[in-house]
Image: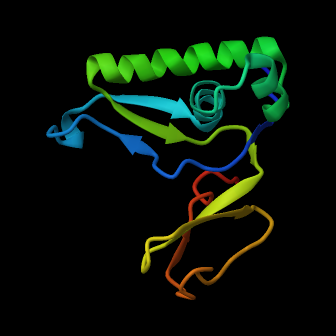
Amino acid sequence: MKQPYRTRKVDQPPQFTTFKPRGIPQKYLKKTELCIDEFEAIRLADYCGMEHYEAAAHMQISRPTFTRLIKKARQKVACALTEGTELYITGGNIELINTLYHCRDCGETVSQPVYLKTENCLECGSENVNDLSEKFLKK
């Protein structure tokens, strides 16, 4: 029986969770699932430019595990770009460090530690705030 993998640290949830080719309705597209830990691996290595050992330490996983994770993530992104599939980011066995709060009124997005719950927008005071981490946290 395969054991579940250990919890991986993710800095914050992605601001956008679905990417698809323009002009093709979703119902006609195949889907490619990218787990949030794979997204974090791409963000750290390719966007932030971290070396594998740095990124692995940031996520609190081993360097070989990070290398397998980034390889899998890059393959999925390449598949979505090459084959024109819809790429969507889903949950996984993760622990979020920060969350993003997006105000639907003023459009501001603010990062805060996950343990600080916010009811109102920090910029305009509106109560119309969306916690982007909710879909990734286990209930």
Looking at the picture, tell me which residue is in the foreground, 133 or 121.
121
Quadrant in which residue 49 is drawn = top right
Q: Quadrant of the N terminus?
A: top right
Q: Is residue 110 above or below residue 60?
A: below
Quadrant in which residue 50 is drawn = top right
Q: How many marks?
A: 0
Query: Which residue is at the far left?
Result: 23
Looking at the picture, tell me which residue is in the foreground, 37 or 138.
37
Q: Is residue 103 above or below residue 67?
A: below
Quadrant in which residue 84 is drawn = top left
Looking at the picture, tell me which residue is in the foreground, 116 or 6.
116
Position of residue 62 measured from the top left corner of the image (x, y, whole percent): 84, 19
Looking at the picture, tell me which residue is in the foreground, 1 or 20.
20
Q: Is residue 56 above or below residue 9?
A: above
In the rendered image, is residue 4 in sight? no
Q: Is residue 122 left or right of residue 96?
A: left
- Seen at 30% across and 16% down, the residue is 82
Q: Is residue 38 above or below residue 11?
A: above
Q: Is residue 20 left or right of residue 67?
A: left
- Seen at 64% across and 25% down, the residue is 45
Q: Is residue 126 left or right of residue 105?
A: right
Position of residue 123 measured from the top left corner of the image (x, y, whole percent): 57, 80
Position of residue 137 measured from the top left corner of the image (x, y, whole percent): 68, 54
Position of residue 110 measured from the top left corner of the image (x, y, whole percent): 61, 66
In the rendered image, is residue 121 in sight? yes
